[in-house]
Image (spheres, rainbow, N blue to C red):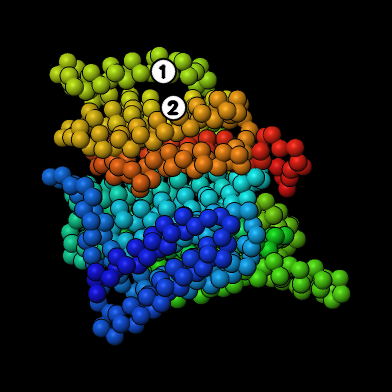
Amino acid sequence: MTFLLQFFILLPILGFAISLIIPDKKEDLLSWGAFTTVGLHLLAATVFVVYWLLQGHETLNLKDIVIYQTTDYSFFIDFYFDKITMVYLMVGAILTFLVTIYSRYYMHREGGYKRFFNTILFFYIGYNIAIFSGNLETLFIGWEILGISSFLLIAFYRDRYLPVKNAVKVFSIYRIGDVGLILAMWMSHHLWHENITFLKLTNYELVSEHLQGHTVIGVFISLMILLSAAAKSAQLPFSSWLPRAMEGPTPSSAIFYGSLSVHLGVFLLLRTYPFWEHQLSVRIVIIVLGLLTSLITTFIARVQSSVKSQIAYASISQIGLIFIEVAAGFEKLALFHFAGNAFLRTYQLLVSPSVVSYLIREQFYNFVPRVKTIEDSLPKKIEYTFYMLALKEWNLDSLMYRYLWNPLKWVGRRLDFLTLERVIYFGIPAYLVGLFIVYNQDLVSPEIERYLPYLFSLIALFMVLKAFTERRQARMSWLLVVMNHFWIALAISFNEHFSFSDVHLYLSGVAVAGVLGFECLRWLKKQEGNIDLDQFHGHSYKHSKVAFVFLIACLGVSGFPITPTFVGEDLIFTHIHEDQPWLALIVSLSFIIDGLSIIRVYARVFLGPHVKSIYEMAYRSS
């Protein structure tokens, strides 16, 4: 039975590949292709699950492909199947099948019909890789695919300002979750000295033995897992992104933010539960976080004027309760709650357009005064205070900007002295000097050499901060992002027992994708003249093929699992020692801002209202 696990990954990949070559105007063929792919997947899943249950439902584990291996490191793809995977598989297959049928008619004659079904199938690939993952590395592949497909679906109406703006905002939160997962993998390598599988985590004696003398490390890994889960499942302080994600088409909102993608944080906690179940402090943190999220988002949901936002906050509230159930050890209840919440929110989102039209009619002909609620029993000052806080969504957006993004932008603006010429004429020679020191480390005293990784990683961070806040030249921002990776590789090269083949693996994908992206921007600059980053240009309308190639380049530079850089990023963190937390923090912060800078360049150059449009456009606040 174990070998059949690969089939559940290969079938969506095959369906996605076929959908890419179907012409745009063949709506029936596109929808039938997606419908058939997901339908066959659902049928196969049902037969497999029934057979698996009849055979005694034993846990299945398949170490499928070893991608990269050295004497002390192995990066491999691992697939895993148990009752958690079974529930997520069946719920995901049924809901995706229903949404695919719904979308055939809902998206009829929509300009991006093919793009929508391509992205849905791409999302389904990521979802299946994530739920079948047998280790954190495999999970991270699916995690990344879900992140980029989320961005593409939120920005589906790419000729409008607000969907594109909110897509970038959501991706920024996802990026924080990505780095939380990377840091968890980093410290796990040092704790286990291997790529630990979820199957081994179920061995209580093994986990207890490793955590006995490494309590702090265990808590750190657990908190990084919680950070990733909270960001993906929109728990505090990241709750405000979920209503913004509703800018996409209603079917994608239902499948992503009502049912499947938003519950991946719960899946991560369930999958890693054997690791942190005996860490009482972590369990208390998860319970408190879930409780606060449920209370606050319940208040917010009650004052929303948009039906989709109300459903989004109601879903967040329920997920907060599921977090509590997982932390309390009620695994079966959490799985049942997940399935119920997923089905309910999908149904609510799919019927929401109809409900709105019904309510508009009802309020004129059958007006009913508001029924008294529990809030009316509170003193008026307290009631009005909660009302205003809920109306402002507890200032969650403002807090994120004030304490995270604005300080980063402030630092970036202090680097305005960096120009394209200075980066090329001074940055490249400085990098060559650093390379010379790496190959001739005996010329530098050990005291100085110890601080060089921090110096070079800070240079990388400053470069990517400048790229993040660059308002003029797109090519300048792109070049700084690429150079950021080279400086990080240089910084880690000073750590002992480091193989230069690891660096070459990491930089190979960055170099190829970097040149490809730079050429796209250079060609577009020649064709259009102005591609500054102070506004959205919407060039995907006229240059759709260039936009697609540039998106591929963006994915390559950001370490998406289509180039060796994806494995290289994991290798980079493996070579950061456990007594170098500041170096890990600087590098992880660079990766967060790196991804944001790349997506920002893509969004500003290729998405949004077209700069040369002669037609009336929606206002930014609409």
Secondary structure beneath disc 2?
Answer: helix
Q: Position of residue 231 (x, y in %)?
A: 47, 53
Q: Is residue 525 above or below residue 294?
A: above
Outermost residue to the bottom: 54
Q: Position of residue 74 (x, y in %)?
A: 20, 49
| Camera-nearest residue between 514 and 269 | 514
Q: Position of residue 341 (x, y in %)?
A: 52, 71
Amino acid tagged 1: Ile
Residue at x 69% of width, y 54% of height: 391
Q: Which residue is mark 2?
A: 479
Can you tell which quarter of the image residue 204 is in? bottom left
Labelled disc at residue 314: none
Can you tell which quarter of the image residue 52 is in? bottom left
Secondary structure beneath disc 1?
Answer: helix
Outermost residue to the right: 365
Give the spatial CA distance, label 1 vs label 2: 9 Å
Q: Is residue 535 above or below residue 111?
A: above
Q: Is residue 291 visible?
A: no
Residue at x 32% of width, y 40% of height: 565
Residue at x 30% of width, y 42% of height: 564
Q: Is residue 309 above or below residue 46?
A: above
Earlier in the chain: of badge 1 and badge 2, it is: 1
Amino acid tagged 2: Leu
Residue at x 84% of width, y 76% of height: 366
Q: Is the Cβ of the residue at disc 1 closer than 8 Å to that at disc 2?
A: yes
Residue 135 is left or right of residue 602, and the answer is left
Q: Which residue is mark 1?
A: 424
